[in-house]
Image (tube, rainbow, N blue to C red):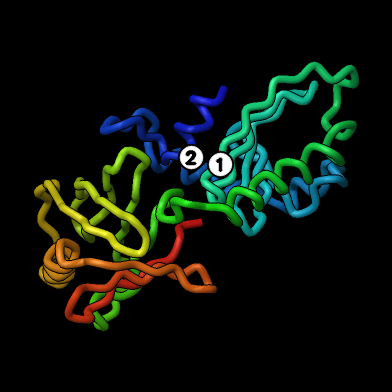
């Protein structure tokens, strides 16, 4: 259960292998119709939805879960970079019997981890919003995904990229080892080249009070990103 939850948290990837298509994970995280869900009478889950066998909270952490009627749970909290695998055999075959205690407990664990996070770069992808003060092209796809083993993945705009990173807060070093070789319109390729030139020059990072990631080079150039929800 925990391994499945970790696979979902990691956008369907295990190491360098894409086990589950990232588009499928993204579809689950977006959830289903909240209006339709509200008509089902789950009064303890206001604002939730259901999609692809997963229960989606739509809360500020982007939490979603797989749930069994006797309390079995895979609880995924992307904001806290957390998976909880709960084995259970609650005597009442309905989550409504245990949700009043279980759901606040899961949230409390997440908030504790976030308050004591020693690896704040980990978790969902960071979506790049600005490259060296020049912004980014609307609807382009530039991201960074810091993985637990010191590996870096993401989208350089047009192509997927792989690399590695080393960090001891607030210092950060990034090395891009390779990208795919797809061709895109020239404006997107120019943005990609600009990003790939900037990443190896990054030396420090900071996450501000709004959750924005600020990466800075030694000569003052910056990269701005926010979490993908």
Residue at the disc numbered 2: 9
Residue at the disc numbered 1: 82
Q: Are there few (<14), some (14-19), or many (20+) residues within 10 Å of tag 2?
A: many
Q: Earlier in the sequence, mark 2 or mark 1?
A: 2
Percent across and percent down for residue 136 are: 28, 74
State the residue at coordinates (36%, 28%).
19
Q: Is residue 74 visible?
A: yes
Give the quadrant of residue 139.
bottom left
Q: Nearer the viewer, residue 117 or 50?
A: 117
State the residue at coordinates (45%, 60%).
227
Please name which of the two marks, 2 or 1, marks the residue nearer to the observer: 1
Percent across and percent down for residue 43 are: 87, 46
State the residue at coordinates (78%, 46%).
104
Up-down relation of residue 187 to residue 50 (above or below): below
Q: Are there few (<14), some (14-19), or many (20+) residues within 10 Å of tag 1?
A: some
Q: Nearer the viewer, residue 126 or 37?
A: 126
Give the quadrant of residue 61.
bottom right
Q: Is residue 220 left or right of residue 144?
A: left
Q: Quadrant of the N terminus?
A: top right
Up-down relation of residue 56 to residue 129 (above or below): above
State the residue at coordinates (71%, 52%).
34
Q: Nearer the viewer, residue 141 or 91?
A: 91
Q: Nearer the viewer, residue 113 or 32?
A: 113
As helix, strand or loop, the secondary structure at mark 1 comes to strand
Find the distance from the CA under tag 2 to the CA under tag 1.
8 Å
């Amino acid at each position: 259960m925990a391994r499945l939850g970790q696979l979902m948290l990691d956008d369907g990837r295990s190491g360098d292998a894409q086990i589950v298509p990232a588009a499928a994970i993204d579809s689950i995280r977006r959830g289903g119709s909240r209006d339709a869900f509200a008509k089902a009478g789950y009064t303890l889950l206001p604002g939730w939805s259901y999609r692809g066998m997963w229960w989606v909270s739509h809360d500020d952490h982007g939490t979603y879960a797989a749930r069994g009627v006797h309390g079995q749970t895979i609880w995924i909290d992307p904001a806290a970079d957390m998976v909880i695998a709960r084995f259970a055999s609650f005597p009442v075959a309905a989550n409504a019997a245990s949700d009043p205690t279980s759901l606040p407990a899961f949230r409390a664990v997440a908030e504790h981890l976030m308050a004591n996070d020693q690896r704040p770069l980990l978790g969902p992808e960071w979506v790049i919003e600005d490259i060296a003060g020049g912004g980014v092209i609307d609807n382009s796809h530039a991201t960074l995904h810091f993985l637990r083993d010191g590996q870096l993945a993401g989208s350089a705009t047009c192509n997927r990229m792989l690399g590695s990173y080393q960090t001891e807060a607030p210092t950060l070093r990034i090395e891009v080892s390779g990208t795919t070789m797809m061709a895109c319109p020239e404006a997107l390729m120019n943005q990609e080249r600009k990003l790939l030139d900037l990443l190896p020059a990054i030396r420090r990072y900071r996450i501000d009070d709004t959750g924005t990631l600020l990466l800075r080079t030694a000569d003052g150039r910056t990269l701005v990103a926010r979490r993908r929800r």
